[in-house]
Image (cartoon, rainbow, N blue to C red):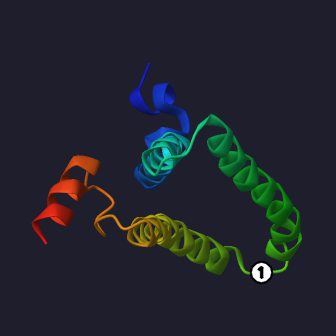
Amino acid sequence: MNRSALLGPLAGRQFRLLWLAAATSAAGSAFVPVAIAFAVLHVGGNATSLGIVLLVGTVAGLASYQVAGVWADRLSRRNLMLTADLAHRVDPKSRTDQRAALHARRGRASSPECPPSADARHSSAS
């Protein structure tokens, strides 16, 4: 049996690259709830606040999917995919900025990666 018969659609280089990019993106997106959980718990939230944050994200997604589906049917597929990929790249950055702003409001260091023990050292040194 030849290679293209074994791989099926993945035998084509362009499709294989597209599939690999989509699979990598999906794997990375699967970690978003884990990152959100750590962020909520890091700023002092509890299980209830984590549940509320995840619920709000789910409800917002379900509501926007209905409108976006109808709207997407009226757009160019190429432009839609380019815009969706661009928005997907911008979204994690906006979440990081929101988290940094929350840290600043709570009187912590502006870096989201700064652990609480380092925050105490910085505030006592000033």
Q: Which of 118 and 40 is in front in this view?
A: 118
Q: What element does badge 1 sit on?
A: loop
Report the quarter where the N terminus lies.
top left
**In the rendered view, does 83 fall on the left or right side of 68?**
left
Q: Quadrant of residue 87?
A: bottom right
Q: Which of 48 and 68 is in front in this view?
A: 48
Q: Left of 4 or right of it: where is 54?
A: right
Which residue is outermost to the top? Answer: 1
Instruction: Identify the residue position indicated by label 1 in the image.
Output: 75
Q: Which of 76 and 125 is in front in this view?
A: 125
Regarding residue 73, the answer to whether it shows in the image is yes
Residue 12 in view: no
- Residue 68: image location, x then y, percent: 81, 70
Write the residue at 55% across / 45% down. Answer: 45
In the current view of this chain or complex, which residue is farthest to the left?
A: 125
Residue 15 location, x and y as percent?
A: 49, 51
Where is residue 124, by image quadrant?
bottom left
Amino acid residing under circle 1 = Leu
What x and y, as percent, mark residue 90? 48, 73
Residue found at x 63% / y 80%: 79
